[in-house]
Amino acid sequence: MENKKLGICIPTYNRANLLDSCLERIVPQVKKYNIPIFISDNASTDNTQEVVKKYQKEYEYIHYHRNDVNIGLDPNFEKVLKLADTEYRWLLGDDDSFFEGSLDVLLELLENDDFDLIVVNAARVKDKKNPKKGISELRVKDVKSKTFTDKNQLLEDLGWHMTLLSSLIFSKNLIEKADFDRYRNTNFLQVGIAFEYLGRKKDIKVYFEESPIVYTFNELGPIGASWFPKIMKIFVEDWFNVISSLPPSYSLKSKLTCVKNHDKKTGVFSLLRLLNIRSFGYLNKEIYNKYKDFYPFVINLPSWMIFLISIFPRNIAEDLRNSYLKLKGINA
């Protein structure tokens, strides 16, 4: 019988190879508990449908929906979360997976308590092709497993981490009452609906699991993500706007801390990563000027340094990037 406690929700678009790897890794694990998988295909033009059919022959609890047209990133997240009919819905990226034993931890947790939201930790693995070789680094390093009842503390401690799609397991009640319209096409719908819902509640109950639950197997990392060409807009302007527009039940201090923590904790705009962004032409003088008012709130480097990187010779930045990838044995 299909498990109605937890469902895996995977939005996807034109990434058949990654989805294939994802399903190859998670299907053997969910089979043990009859956990359903819900896939919303955003009108892919590759062989995504054939990949899904292959695994449907192997596992009966894979539910597949294909949009007639590409409805956009955030609307497809909404689609897959509403496609599920389970008590809890885990939004999983199509280039992510979960470690062996993760489902045991989560199902035990869900059987013994009720939560508005569950946030799980992620980890870097030493070998993405063989995650069993070990973990190299936890994404959240300074927060222990706990139940958050203070919404401002949650925003400060984990708001930055919740940008990671696969870190979030939503309750049915949150999805049914979420204000999707408000956060649609913001690039942070999953963060917005969670904090909007919690912000309207007097009492909240959000659990954070510190042990490593998820990891990515996409070797290119952010470079292979659909949002990477717009990284400056998304993680500067859009990120600031979504968090600053959260309900007044969140303090200004907590909002500003959350905004700054994303770069501080992930290093998305470190010196080396900005050089990488520059190597693709996604940071230049024009882009620098467009978002310069946001930098003091979002990026931990001084604005003058960001400007220097924006005019750094792109060909040299490209050479540095290619040398790094070659050293790592990655073909971009």
Image (cartoon, grey):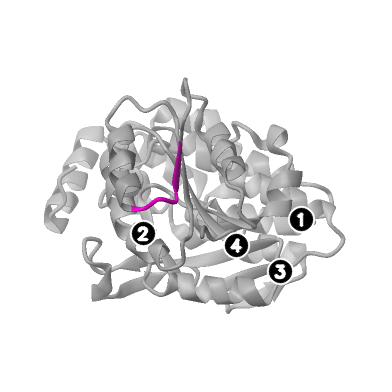
* Residue named by callout 4: 5
* Residue named by callout 3: 114
The first of marks 3 and 1 along the sequence is 3
Q: Residue 249 in the image: x percent, y percent?
A: 84, 54
Residue ranking furthest to the top: 69
Residue ranking furthest to the front: 1
Neighbour tally class for label 3: few under 14, some 14-19, many 20 plus, Cα within 10 Å: some
**What's the amino acid at mark 1?**
Leu
Q: CA distance from mark 1 to mark 2?
A: 30 Å
**What's the amino acid at mark 3?**
Asp
Q: CA distance from mark 4 to mark 2?
A: 17 Å
Q: CA distance from mark 3 to mark 1?
A: 15 Å
Q: CA distance from mark 4 to mark 1?
A: 21 Å
Asked which quadrant contains residue 43, the reply is: top left
Local secondary structure at mark 1:
helix
In the image, which disc is placed on residue 26?
A: 2
User: Camera-side residue: 115 or 283?
Assistant: 115
Residue at 19%, 42% (x, y): give it: 332
Residue at 32%, 73% (x, y): give it: 135
Q: Residue 20 in the image: x percent, y percent?
A: 28, 46
Local secondary structure at mark 3:
loop
Relative horizontal placement of residue 201, taking residue 311 as reference (left or right): right
Local secondary structure at mark 2:
helix
Q: Which residues are magenta?
A: 59-64
User: Camera-side residue: 158 or 68?
Assistant: 68
Q: Let me know if residue 123 is in the magenta part.
A: no
* Residue named by callout 1: 198
